[in-house]
Image (tube, grey):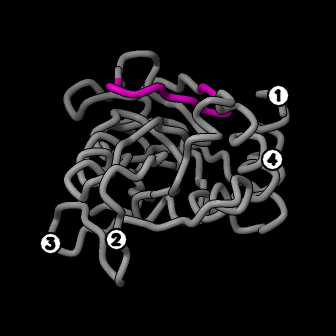
Amino acid sequence: MTEDDVLSEFRASEALLEGHFKLSSGRHSGHYLQCARVLMDPMRASRLAAALAAKLPREIRSAIDVVISPAMGGIIIGHEMGRALGKEAMFLERPDGTFGLRRGFAIEKGAKIIVVEDVVTTGLSSKEAMKAVEDAGGEVLALVSVVNRTGGDVSFDVPYHALVEITFPTYADDEVPAELAAIPVTKPGSRK
């Protein structure tokens, strides 16, 4: 699946939005990728996950024991990655503000894990999720996401693979351009 194919999936599902958005990272943007919308079609989610699984190097694909994703945004793509890879899929939650496993989920000590996200922007949630996996006894082999919005400004201690890189500009609260500030802000992400 090419980058154009991925963006076509977003456009077809009306998941590529324009306006003034406050992202989960706290930054502002004139564009928002509503991954929940692109993933609401099970066949589309399956295609995207299969394409993402195919991007993983063979040595990582063959070593994976479990797929783990952070709630909320990563649950659907994480589940579909589990299906594409033939592996169990679990998710992390933040009931007390910090990611952890609940619902009877547990990681065997030394289990080889990939962390799956919908979108990575600042990498903070991804790093928190990977730390939670390591604290639970797992070894993170890679981070994967449908969309990479980091602009190349974020590094991870593990390989990072994404289906598409999108570099819409983002702004701190004190950097928002006047034309964007003139548009009422919407906060579409899962984190309040």
Q: Determine whether label 4 and label 2 are within 8 Å by CB.
A: no
Mark drawn on residue 2: 1
Label 3 near label 1: C-beta < 8 Å? no
169 w.r.t. 187: above or below: above
Left or right, residue 79 beside residue 112:
right
Q: Nearer the viewer, mark 4 or mark 2?
A: 2
Question: Image point 22% across, 75% down: which residue?
Answer: 95
User: Given the image, on which type of amino acid does mark 2 rest?
Assistant: Ala
Query: What's the distance in space between the residues labelled 1 and 4, CA to CA?
Result: 11 Å
Q: CA distance from mark 3 to mark 4?
A: 35 Å
- Residue hosting label 4: 9
Note whether 119 is above or below 34 in the view shown. Answer: above
Q: Whole-percent x and y of residue 183?
A: 44, 44
Of 178 and 76, the residue lying toward us? 76
The residue nearer to you, when weighing 109 against 56, is: 109
Seen as rendered, the residue at the extreme top is 152
Answer left or right for 37 relative to 51: left
Q: Are marks 2 and 3 in contact (CB under 8 Å)?
A: no
Depth check, front residue: 35 or 182: 35
Residue in the foreground of this view, choosing between 181 and 4: 4
Image x and y of residue 94, in percent = 25, 68
Give the label, 1 or 4, closer to the camera.
1
Q: Which mark is residue 106?
A: 2
Q: CA distance from mark 4 to mark 2?
A: 34 Å
Q: Which residues fall within the magenta stretch?
A: 156-165
Q: Amino acid at mark 3?
A: Asp
